[in-house]
Amino acid sequence: MGFAHTVGGTRYVFDDLRTLLARATPARSGDLLAGVAAASSAERVAAQRALADLPLGHFLDESVIPYEADEVTRLIVDSHDPRAFAPVRHLTVGGFRDWLLADADGAVLSALAPGLTPEMVAAVSKICRVQDLVAIAAKCRVVTRFRNTLGLPGTLSIRLQPNDPVDDPKGVAAQILDGLLLGAGDAVIGVNPATDSPDNICRLLTMLDALRERFAIPTQSCVLAHVTTTLLAIERGAPVDIVFQSIGGTEGVNRSFGVSLDLLREAREAALGLRRGTLGDNVMYFETGQGSALSAEAHHGCDQQTLEARAYAVARAFAPLLVNSVVGFIGPEYLFDGKQILRAGLEDHFCGKLLGLPMGVDVCYTNHAEADQDDMDALLTLLGVAGVTYVMGVPGADDVMLAYQSTSFHDGLYARAVLGKRPAPEFAAWLDAMGIARRTPEQLPAVMAPVLA
Amino acid sequence: MSGGADEPGSGRAEVGPPLLWRDLRRFTTARVGLGRVGHAQPTSAHLDFQEAHARARDAVWSALDSTALASSLEAFGVATRQVASEAADRRTYLLRPDLGRRLAAADREVLAADSRPGCLALVVADGLCASGVQTQAAELVAHLLPALGASGWDLAPVVLASQARVALGDDVGEVLGAVAVAVMIGERPGLSAIDSVGIYLTWAPHRGRTDAERNCISNIRPAGLRPADAARKLLWLLAAARRLGATGVALKDDESVALEGTASPTIDAMQR
């Protein structure tokens, strides 16, 4: 079945749903690279108008990647909840946008989430302006728990990201202390390892856990190793709080990451079995990013934003503590400049939240992207207004291991200050007790110094 | 409110536990202990960052001066050829990695005249940082030449490639009939290193080789892996590749880091 719309006397025809979604997507380099982008502004708006007229129910009849060919499609179709979908089943994509802006509140959206497919959510995002992406996401309520409570209204959490080029324990510890002194670490203290060997991962896990225990910090730690390495670490008895994995929106991209839905299920069961969460059992942490499927040559002719939303369908099957898009990290061939990164970051947050995920964003860029600190400030501020669950914190915005720029600990303080947000309540109480809630002392708190002795 | 410092370290002692916030700087090259003005970074730390980013941006957009590089290489008695990829300019190069991996058709024809089956091809490519390669390529080649001759390698004219990605070496190697190609290429500048060069070695190069079939030596720069040591590593890899008849994951040991196409792709994997 095809779709068509006429703009300025020209009739634009779109052969199938994935083509319609791709042509309707606001311009970005990755879709041009994939050859799926609209050829003109007129074709794009024609696709957006045709998409706006499409009944939401159509998304239950046509998949962008065939059911037989892809386990992510099967997950989406098989887990769809028709009862939750009922309140919007009569709407078109355009009517859904109006309904989201006018009628929906947080409780309604939480109940709706299991009834939405990622393609429906991606579709409505394509006809939203930036302010719509912000306003609708701000209504969503998603709360998760492990050793603290993330996502409560009025809070903004920070992942403390103390990466070291050679996984030097003192280099990692110094960055953790710096982050704690600047109020970061309530989302997770999470290290990207330079070396993904079981010995190294176990060493880092043990070190992070000892540090957390020593200060009695109400948070969780994570070493962002491959899920198979983390499973080995669990077998060896290492203190694994939450399990990390990069995921994507097709079976093929997940294969390129070395994972499948079965493997993720196995990892979640293993982490649940450790019973380390004190307040809740959200034990998974996923990272995603527009462009990963094209990079893995597993995009099936779909646009990168639709596939990104499908990655969130993978994530929600595992009740994660945290999900984030690494929006500016994948490179300028996918998101070229500050404008593209900004919109994509807000789309990712919007889609993740509508699907019921505790969505964070790595507000970031690489040095070969046309972006700078001003672009990051704009995206961070907009995401804060949109109610982003968490952002990253790296010392001085400079990740010395991954060689890219993310948000700094100071940026986290800024966003909380101008938006009137607080850390997760348990963590805020800990900062108070440590005497570092409102200011950073020149003298290190006595309990901290021995860590680096 | 500010706990920052203008000088690295506390000066108190280089041993023993840190006492001040800024003492954290003794333990990492990360930007810790920057101080704080309200919620923000003090002006000096803010401008340090802006300066580092400005230099990295300029390095990304720097252009390879192939003519100057050719004359410094020819001073060693090495013949050179200048080629380009199918990416017409820097913007295209950044947007279309596929074009940067392909040798321009005209250059393919010109290079065919130099075909010498069994030769070793050496490509010097701008990659994501021409300025780094510009300053270090000659020294790398100077360290390689004597040992290459002694090991019996037949070195083809050195190919200087602009707007080039690593895989452009596959086209070059294929046209030259090379048994192996070594690509010296500028690595993506970070805030702390804007002059890093990587060397990628590929056995039996032809279009379509994957990253898993290459070996890489990275972070070559005065403050990282020194050119003399990098040259020694490359010679070791060449000898091992000749013995094995292959590069890539099959050739993996302490001397090098093989590129693995599995598990979690790194940011570097996505830039090649």
Image (spheres, coloured by chain):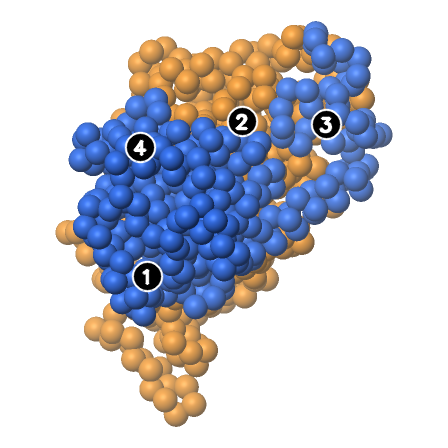
Q: Residue farthest to the bottom?
A: A9
Q: Which residue is mark 3?
A: B33
Judged from the image, the secondary structure of the residue bearing numbered disc 4 is: helix
Q: Which residue is mark 2?
A: A164
Relative depth, front residue between A249 and B69: B69
Disc sitting over residue B150 in the figure: 4
For the residues carrying marks 1 and 2, which lies nearer the camera in this image?
1
What residue sits 45% from the left and 51% below the top?
B74
Percent across and percent down for residue A288 are: 41, 44
Percent across and percent down for residue A227 are: 34, 28
Q: Colour of chain B?
A: blue
What is the chain identity of the residue bearing mark 4?
B
Distance from the alpha carbon under mark 4 to that under mark 1? 31 Å
Dot 4 and dot 2 within a common chain = no
Dot 3 and dot 4 within a common chain = yes
Q: Is residue A282 in view? A: no
Dot 4 and dot 1 within a common chain = yes
**Image quarter (top left, top right, bottom left or bottom right) of the C terminus of chain A:** top right
What is the chain identity of the residue bearing mark 2?
A
What residue sits 38% from the left and 35% below the top?
B146
Q: Is residue A20 above or below residue A220?
A: below
